[in-house]
Amino acid sequence: MTDTIDNIGKDFIRQIIIADNASGKHDGNVVTRFPPEPNGYLHIGHVMSICLNFGIAEEFNGRCYLRFDDTNPVKEDQDFVDSIMADVHWLGFDWEDRLTHAADYFEDLYSCAVKLIEDGKAYVDSLSAGQIREYRGTLTEPGKDSPHRDRSVEENLDLFRRMRAGEFDDGAYVLRARIDMAAPNMNLRDPALYRIRKINHQQTGNAWSIYPMYDFAHTVSDALEGITHSLCTLEFEDHRPLYEWILDNLDLPNRPRQIEFSRLNVAYGITSKRKLAALIEGGFVSGWDDPRMPTVAGMRRRGYTPQSIRNFVRNAGVTKKDKLIEMGALENCVREDLNQIAPRAMAVLNPLKVVFLNHPQGEMEMLPAMNHPNNPELGVREIPFGREIFIERDDFMEDPPRKFFRLRPGGEVRLRYAYIIKCVDVIKNDAGEILEVHCTYDPDTKSGRPGADRKVKGTIHWVSADESVTVEVRLFDRMFTLANPDANHEGKTVADFLNPDSLNVVSEARVEPALVGMEPGTHVQFERLGYFLIDTKDSQPGQPVFNRVVTLRDSWAKIEKAQLAEI
Ligand code: ATP
Ligand code: MG
């Protein structure tokens, strides 16, 4: 990996690692970690960190830990732990035997804190949280020393021991690093290292009454695990001096280097667990796995594939600049992947009945249809064609504009995999609503017949009226009406920007009968309508529910264009 040619096109983090390996730093070892707090489900932003940490370990023959940064038991939960593990596996990464928790190091962390106290580098403070904030100063004014800053080592050790023993109430004392209350970087103004929290922890139960603060736990865990490159998002840049201070002042087996990169943000989505949780609490979505959510669970339920999400994250790249990436870029990756693997089928979302006056009653023929245009391995199926079919209501217009190439009175259109048909009559009710369309079909125009090559301008999809099945289809749109609902909008929350039309349930769609037997979790492309997934949660045997993963956008327009060009 030291060849400079290999470095071209590598992001700045990989460049650093290549240089470190070349210089023999860390003896050529590359050890990374993905460190989620188990306080919510993973979202698309986390996927970037996962791909980066696990990806780098893979590329450089290194190792990557999955470490739960479980230092705040108030917000943590086993369900979150389980979902995070399932999601990382689903994305295609494996921590093997490297599953750890900050809690695994609670005893070591305690010893490190004792060491800092013994060295006069930490003290127990009895100021209240409010007072600590007051004493902290501001960005323009230095802070003030706490009156307890000069407690003796003995007294500090005694108080810290008793904090651990559970002798005091929450908030009575905190352990603080003794750094510099006038430091320009606020993170160095005697940051808290430990606080009292008399609460059960999902890993350690009631063993502890004190819990380490994130910065302290994170740094020491990195060092103890032998992490070489500690990759985190830009908001931790200001914490790096504290990270280094902790490493400088403890005798730890290894010195990791913290490197920051910019967060991945997706337009029309949000990447904050707290805000996603608020959407669930507000009842705006059905849960963490609602198919509209930018969570891994939501994207899986929607039908995005791990490959497409990984491709998206890879294309987004690793930089130091904040970025808001179009949702369309993710959808393109999904399309590209599903295009390869999804068998084709036909469905009609808004059915309009078409009756063929020249087709004998009760007769049905089977027409062959390719399951995939360029993957013959997916085979051929037979679709039933009879006297009555359904087409999309908006593929028929009584009084269409000039460029409308679908069905109109007196006009012709081709049915996909079947015949050219001609509209001869429109049947309406008293209110003037169209009930059905009467057509004739041209028996000579099916595949293998002399008229098979006859051209008409439009091709539409359809299903048999008798042999199709009614199913529920769920169509999704952007969850928000603004590209950046997450930004600070005066006095408003993300809930104010929810798109009221983000979920459209079609309860009477019609699909080919063969689809009813397919397993939940199966992908299919409904021609002209998009890629769909049979929902894994709400489908019942014989009653599939289809989620639209993504629309097809232009692919059908291209087919039509090519057809027009041939004319
Ligand atoms: P949130 O703000 O959603 O709670 P977080 O950063 O607090 O996110 P953690 O569980 O601490 O969530 O994140 C685990 C790792 O994922 C961290 O290293 C964090 O830097 C990284 N991460 C979180 N969000 C993003 C993002 N949008 N882009 C890239 N990496 C991210
Ligand atoms: Mg965090």
Image: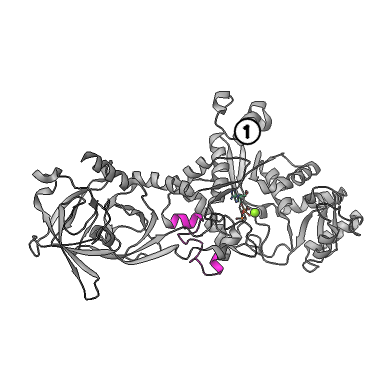
**Does residue 97 show up?**
no
Foreground pick, 116 / 347: 347
Q: Determine crowd level at label 1: few under 14, some 14-19, many 20+ residues with C-alpha closer than 10 A.
A: many
Q: Residue 12 at x, y = what percent? A: 61, 35
> Residue 420 at x, y = what percent?
15, 52
Q: Does the magenta segment cover residue 299?
A: yes
Count of number-bearing discs: 1
The quadrant in which the N terminus is found is top right
> What residue sits 90% from the left and 54% below the top?
153
| Residue 547 picture quarter | bottom left
Q: Quick check: 341 above or below 467?
A: above
Helix, strand or loop at disc 1?
helix
**Residue underneath mark 1:** 17
Q: Is residue 244 above or below residue 406?
A: above
Q: Quadrant of ligand 2?
A: bottom right
Q: What kind of residue is marked 1?
A: Ile
Q: Residue at x 73, y 67 (%)?
A: 198
- Magenta span covers which residues? 279-301
Q: At which x and y percent is residue 91?
A: 48, 48
* Residue 51: x %, y % from top left: 54, 44
